[in-house]
Structure formats: structure tokens, C-alpha cells
Image (cartoon, rainbow, N blue to C red):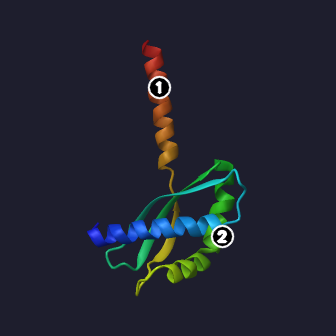
Amino acid sequence: MSRRQIQVAELIKRELSGILERHLDRSPSTLVTINEVVISPDFLEAKVYVSIFPEEESKRVFKEMELKKNDFYSLLFKKLKMKIVPKIQFHLDWRPKEADKVEKIIKKLQNESK
């Protein structure tokens, strides 16, 4: 990614995090984290990778995010001082879950070797 893409991605990540915090209907124990934002080279699309914990809530919260995507885009458009604000595409990010599995396996192997 270019330097400009990285800057726009970080800006969207910061602003969208606040928007999700204020406008997403979720229980206080549900954590929604934006792990990464990837901007297309033409700046027309933004892939937003999110993790939702606990996992039992992920489908419901993700569905709500998809339903409110246009509202979030409108709020983001008002916050950002840009001619073109990339369209948002939400994606569930399973990398933290996979990393946790790998860590558990490594710890288990280390304990077995002792």
C-alpha cells in the first residue's frame, strides 16, 4: 500500500471505531475491534476487518453492522474532510482466534517437553 493509502486506512480505522462504539447496538460485554483497514488503490473501497468477542455474539453483531453499513458510511463521510470516502466492506477477521489456537498448541507442546 502507498503512504497515502496507509494514512487514509488509519484515519478510517480511528473514526469508524468511534462510530461503531456509539451507534452499534451491543451488550456491554461484547467487544468489537477493528483489526485492519485495507484501502483499494483507487480509494473507492475500504475492507474493514473486525473481530467480535464473545464469539457467540459475532453473527448477530456482524449482521447488524452489515444492515447499518450505509448509516456508518454517512457518519464517516460527515467526519472526514475528503472528496471521496471509500465504501465500507466489513469482513470478520478470524486471525486473532487462529493465533490463540496456535499459542495454545505451542504452550501445550512446551509443557509436554518439560
Find disc 1 in the rendering and name its residue.
Answer: 107
The answer to which image quadrant residue 58 occupies is bottom right
Mark 1 or mark 2: name the one nearer the start of the chain. Answer: 2
The answer to which image quadrant residue 19 occupies is bottom right
- Disc number placed over residue 23 in the picture, else none: 2
Can you tell which of label 1 and label 2 is closer to the viewer? 2
- Disc number placed over residue 96 in the picture, else none: none
The one of 13 and 68 positioned closer to us in this rendering: 13
The residue drawn where x is 33% and y is 66% is 6
Percent across and percent down for residue 21 are 62, 64
The residue drawn where x is 73% and y is 56% is 27
- In the visual, does 43 lie left or right of 13? left
The one of 88 and 72 positioned closer to us in this rendering: 72
The answer to which image quadrant residue 4 occupies is bottom left
* Residue situated furthest bottom in the rendering: 83
Figure quadrant of the C terminus: top left
